[in-house]
Amino acid sequence: MTAIATALEALESGLPDLLADIGALVRTESPSADVSAVTDCARAVAALGTRLTATPPEWLDGSGRPALRWRFGSGDRVLLLGHFDTVWPVGSLARHPFEVAGGRLTGPGCFDMKAGVAQLFHALSVLDDLDGVSVLLTGDEEIGAPTSRALIEAEARRTRAVLVLEASEQGALKTARKGVSSYELGIAGRAAHAGLEPHRGVNTTIELAHQVLALSALADPATGTTVTPTVATSGTTRNTVPDAARLLVDVRVATAAEQDRVDRAVHALAPALAGAALTLSGGPDRPPLQPSSSAELFERAAAHYAELGLGPLRGVAVGGASDGNITAGAGAPTLDGLGAVGGGAHADDEHVLVTELPRRAALVSSLVASLLREPPGAPDRVGP
């Protein structure tokens, strides 16, 4: 029996323990905004990782928000990356309890991405030697990694490859993710009575309309660039010419060149109405994870997947971002979507397919072993 088949057999026999560990994490609710809850979940994750690897983590404090890091030996060959915060508020378990039934596992945050966190440690538990592995788990991914970004970038620069345990819809790995830019446009005008002397005002709702059209025109469907005005507010009362407006803008791009083009254009916006003034904040948030960042790692993963007898492995490009965008932007080869297989992220039907849990853990285990032997760029040998 090959090493990868042996790992799969061990992980399948340990499925009840894996399910119990996922359940413990799901029941420890951890919405990103609740630092106390996130810290409680970090303790549960730390205990799980310590039990399965016989090594306690380093607690890294970013502005009071915890991240956990494990380094085994040099820790510089492969980084396993994930997060333990969720979008679900405390109390969500009352409506969506953790359950395993009909081949599906449910509960708030199970798919995105507490099952992936548990899978990560079970995947490592069947390896004999972890020298060269690092694990970084953060508590603020769902809000854009404001405190952990620098830490993620630093870890990415010291490693040879990054495996991201984010969830996977329909089993496809994330071989590309769009980059994200976020902007807030402020508009200042002049108030006046809408009935008596509207001509004396500078109407920020009209200026807002001009800016919405100008921003929308920056999209480029041919390159996959979307520029989407989202939240807009202007004015105070029906009979007052509004003197202040605010607009939020979401930008998604497939390439760094497009991210730069849109950023320059947004900063070049000018008022359309005499007397109006614009202020702008925000900018590029996460760089794109481009196919070149994942190509070699995906090739290895596909070979291991076939060796497991699970058929062809699919890769997909998606518009959503993850911390894998950050590691790819820092120059580290990055493969994303190696966590739970299921669906319904952030929704009432969030779920994980139970039969896929040990299979994905075995794939991660085999990839780690392969990368410890031969990091990206080394002579090709993906077998056991």
Image (spheres, grey):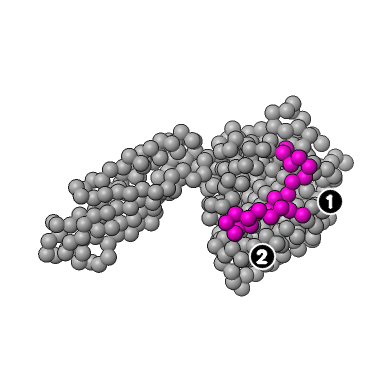
Q: Position of residue 362 (x, y in %)?
A: 77, 46
- In what quadrant of the picture does the C terminus appear? top right
Is label 1 or label 2 in front?
A: 2
Q: Which residues are magenta?
A: 56-77
Query: As drawn, is 199 to the left or to the right of 47?
Result: left
Q: Position of residue 219 (x, y in %)?
A: 39, 41
Mark 2 residue element: helix
Report the residue that reaches farthest toward the bottom. 94
Relative to 333, does residue 211 appear above or below in the rendering?
Answer: below
Relative to 107, does residue 9 appear above or below in the rendering?
Answer: above
Residue 10: image tag: 1
Residue 101, located in which quarter of the rendered image? bottom right
Determine if the magenta segment contains residue 308: no
Determine if the magenta segment contains residue 62: yes
Type of amino acid at the residue the image marks with label 2: Asp
Number of marks:
2
Mark 1 residue element: helix
Q: Identify the residue shown where x is 49% and y is 35%.
A: 255
Give the residue pinned by disc 2: 40
Residue 366: image tag: none
